[in-house]
Amino acid sequence: MPIGGSRRRSPGELESGVLAVLWAAGTPLTPGDVQQELGGELARTTVNTILSRLHEKGVLLRHRVGRAFAYSPAQEARDAPGLAARRMRSELENAPDRDTVLARFVDGLSEDDEQLLRALLGEGAGPE
C-alpha cells in the first residue's frame, strides 16, 4: 500500500470519477471545483491532467473562466452509454483492419445482443 495508506487508483477509475462529478453538476466546473467535489483527496495537478486528457479525447468541452478553464461533458459523453459508444467508435477508428474488428465484435455478441443490433440496423423489422 502506498505511503499515507491510500491505494493507487487506475487512470480509468479517476476519469470515471471526474466524469461522474461533471455529469452530476450539470454546469461547467473548474479543476478546483472538480477537486473539491471529489473530496479534495487528489492534487490539483492530477485533476488538471485528467481534465486535459479527457478534453484531448473529445470527451469534455472547455471554455475560459478568468485564468482557468471550466469543463463540461461533450454532447455524446453526457452519460455512461454515450461515453461507451464513443469509446467503441474510437477503437474502431483506430483499428487498421475495421472489417476484422467488426466481425470479431459481432461474433462475440450474445444472441439477444445480436438480435438487438439487427433491429437497430433495420434488419429485424421485416417487411412493412
Image: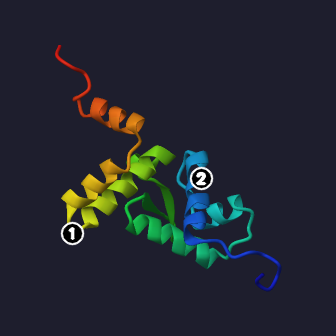
Q: Is residue 92 above or below residue 107?
A: below
Q: For numbered disc 1, what is the local secondary structure?
A: loop
Q: For numbered disc 2, what is the local secondary structure?
A: helix
Q: Do we see residue 79 in this rendering?
A: no
Q: How is the image coloured?
A: rainbow
Q: Do we see residue 120 in this rendering?
A: yes
Residue 120 falls in which quadrant of the image?
A: top left
Residue linked to disc 2:
20
Q: Position of residue 94 (x, y in %)?
A: 27, 67
The type of residue carrying mark 1 is Pro
Which one is closest to the eye, mark 1 or mark 2?
A: 1
Mark number displayed over residue 42:
none
Residue plotted at (51% across, 67% down):
51
Residue plotted at (60% across, 64% down):
13
Residue 24 placement, left or right of 66: right
Q: Is residue 85 above or below residue 2?
A: above
Q: Position of residue 32 (x, y in %)?
A: 64, 66
Residue linked to disc 1:
96
Which quarter of the image is occupied by the N terminus?
A: bottom right
Q: Position of residue 86 (x, y in %)?
A: 37, 53
Q: Position of residue 76 (x, y in %)?
A: 39, 47
Q: Residue furthest right?
A: 5
Of residues 106 and 29, the one nearer the viewer is 106
